[in-house]
Amino acid sequence: MNRLSQWLFDPVPLARVVLFRRFVYAFVIIDILLLHTSGFRHGWADPVWYQPLIMGEWLNIPAANVPQVMILKWGTVLVAAFALTGRFPRVSGLVVAVGWIWYQYVAFAYGKVDHDRGDFVIALVVLPLIGMAATAGPAGDRTRSELAGFAFRAMQLAAIATYFLSAWAKVRFGGWEWVNSATITRAVIRRGTFIGDWLLEIPWSLHAFQWVLFSAEMLAPVIFFVGEKWRRRMVAAWFVFHAATYSVITIAFWPHLVMMLAFLPLEEYRDRAVARWNSWRGGDSGEPEPQVKTPASPA
Amino acid sequence: MLRLGKPAKGLLAALLLVVSALFLGGTFVGSDDWWPFAPWKMYSTSTAPSGPVGSTLIEIQEAGSPEWQPASLHPDTVGLNRAEIEGRMTMIKEDPAVLGTLLKSHSELLPDDPEWTAIRVVRSDVILHEGERTGETRDTTLAVWPSSARTAEDDAPRIITEAAQ
């Protein structure tokens, strides 16, 4: 029990929270403006097409109309931009969470639910928990926080659950024979690129891809039991997988890609990039500071 | 290091358990209605290696032209996308008049485009044999609105054969 608690609340530097939440709120803006726009157009669809989800029945959410989607779209974008400044992180984070979830709801309550957006909800809900993190200094606050650790663990679990549970959904809806079906062939016929069309000429390639995909999804939770080095390699492998999927059927699970960043030590990457940038600009300012302890400086 | 008290940890762990239970419930017994806890069923259904792979499309007539022409089935043109129309086919077949709302949404979204006067929903089946395309496509009319635009060609599938691949 104690070890489980240690794992769940394994502290994370606040600097990582500062960087991660920038990815999240920047993504919200890009997503609403460019990536997932079908909800906006539902403002123009006749209410006869509205099919409330359970959430909408509980909360009495009405069918979309033009003013509603305008307010949701631009309101959420504005507050997300404000959240990027790091001020009032709890309030702004909460408003973005409500706005984005509602906007997705409008997109999904017209007969088609996308299945790649459940995990991002977790990120939007847990980030406002860590209020003070956003105020960490620009140089990066190395203070570690158990609350931040919990938030990251929850996001990692949600991201990996997306793979693992989607494998089980395949078993539930497609049966174990899913791996031998023509599901990916069907996807390529419906929305394949020229690479996809080329793979259609080699039918075994798409068949093999289904076996690889299904096995990788079932084994995804292994990531929690391996060392740091392999963890990073596995995250990289998933990014390669998603790039390959995009090149074949132009489908990318965008919010989920942001979630996968929750596995990475972003503040270390940032420091390394900054050091490289400084040394590239010449001078030795990019060199690591001497290890000799100097008296505490005001910075 | 910023630590958390025991009660806070207990509360957060309990919340995590509840959310996990909802996601697990969604996967094993839930449906799309459960979103955000809906099952993650992207590409989860099985498609038989031999048989039809269908996709739905719309064809329209413009004012003054009785000819059917393919049109974009996209949120920017009619307020809905293909999957949403596919998900509501039962309703559309029962009451093709709902297709009339798409004509209205189209003229509101694109007021400068030629007006659409009739619309039909067509399922285009690409025929597979053991995972490969046979070169045959079968187009079936699923619904027409207004009903006066319906003709004899809507009563049977239209078979189109491509030159051998």
Image (cartoon, coloured by chain):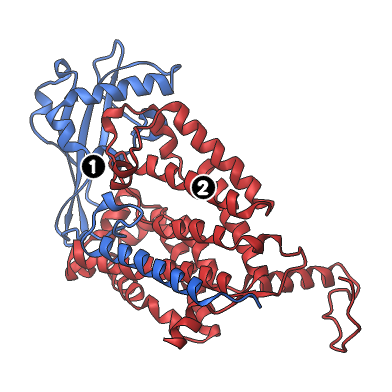
Chain colours: A red, B blue
Amino acid at the residue labelled 2? Asp
In the rendered image, the quadrant that contains the N terminus of chain A is: bottom left
Nearest the viewer among B91 and B112 is B91
Amino acid at the residue labelled 1? Gly
| Distance of label 1 from label 2 (alpha carbons) | 24 Å
Q: Is residue A240 left or right of residue B95?
A: right
Question: Is any part of residue A204 visible from this angle?
Answer: no
Coordinates of residue B101 in the picture (x, y in percent): 28, 23
Coordinates of residue B133 in the picture (x, y in percent): 22, 54
Residue shown at 40%/52% (left/top)? A193
Q: Check disc 2: other Cα within 10 Å, few if <14, some if 14-19, many if 20+.
A: some
| Chain of the residue under the numbered disc 1 shown in the image | B
Determine the residue located farthest toward the top in the rendered image.
B64
Residue shown at 15%/37% (left/top)? B90
Nearest the viewer among B27 and A230 is B27
The image quarter in which residue B1 lies: bottom right
The image quarter in which residue A213 lies: bottom left
Give the residue number, with chain letter if any, for mark 1.
Answer: B87
Q: Is residue B162 left or right of residue A216?
A: left
In the rendered image, the quadrant that contains the C terminus of chain A is: bottom right
Give the residue number, with chain letter if any, for mark 2.
Answer: A31
Q: In this rendering, is residue A15 above or below A294?
A: above
Determine the residue located farthest toward the front in the rendered image.
B7
Coordinates of residue A168 in the picture (x, y in percent): 26, 69
What is the secondary structure assignment of the residue under circle 1?
helix
Q: In this rendering, is residue A228 above or below B68?
A: below
Q: Are marks 1 and 2 in contact (CB under 8 Å)?
A: no
